[in-house]
Amino acid sequence: MRNKRLPYLIVLAIILLAVAYLLWAGRVPWCTCGYIKLWHGDTMSSENSQHIADWYTPSHLLHGLLFYGALWLVARRVPFGWRLVIATVVEAGWEMVENSSFIIERYRAVTISLDYFGDSVVNSVSDILAMIIGFHLARVIPVWASVALVIGFEVLTAFIIRDGLALNVLMLLYPLDAVRVWQGGL
């Protein structure tokens, strides 16, 4: 019984280590506006990525679906809890890298996120938890439903905020002026 809980305790420890690192790195614990909202929907705001959930939360849920699928392909014999540990390490690692000065400046230089100054710690933890929810969800829903969620959330966020997981990755790694212009609504 104890061995079955160990991966989940490790997941909790990873989240706490990420929190400690982000605070040590100077990230604000929560929005400097002085309060925490469950949802903040204005992406062109200094409060974006500062509250519990925002339009980028679906991309973290998709991380969970995609990590589950990838780990099922390459490590399906590894118990679920340990695959979750691997996914959490990757997601927490991304949250730490995403909030580094280098990546923040990259976002500001090559995307429309000119007012992006990094995530609050509350938002980063929420992003990790969204990934965990997606990972668990992928375990219980059919593959076609996971694919539908990925496509649905990508279309929804592209339509509403002109961004999403695929566009975010594209613009971070290989920025295209045409995409940047479209994202800016010009």
Image (cartoon, rainbow, N blue to C red):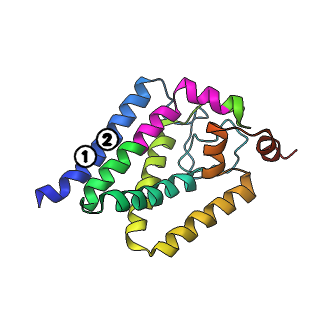
Residue at the spot 46% in from the left edge and 39% down from the top edge: 94
Q: Which residue is mark 1?
A: 10
Q: Looking at the picture, how far across and down is residue 70, in whole percent? A: 41, 57
Q: Disc number at residue 61?
A: none
Measured as percent of width and height from the top left, residue 69 is found at 42, 62
119 or 99: nearer the eye?
99
Instruction: Please tell me whether residue 119 is drawn above or below residue 88 in the rendered image.
Output: above
In the image, the segment drawn in magenta is: 91-107
Residue at 61%, 65% in the rendered image: 151
Q: Within 10 angstroms of label 2, few (less than 14), some, or many (20 or more) residues?
A: some
Task: Indicate yes or no whether the magenta region holds residue 97.
Answer: yes
Crowding at label 1, few (<14), some or many (≥20) Cα neighbours within 10 Å? Answer: some
Residue 55 visible, this orientation? no
Q: Secondary structure at mark 2?
A: helix
Q: Mark 2 to mark 1: distance in Å?
A: 6 Å
Left or right side of 159 for 36 = left
Q: Which residue occupies 69% across, 50% down? A: 163
Looking at this view, is 173 or 135 the one in front? 173
Quarter containing the N terminus = bottom left
The amino acid beneath tag 2 is Ile
- For disc 2, the marked residue is 14
Query: Residue extending furthest right?
Result: 186
Give the residue type at disc 1.
Ile
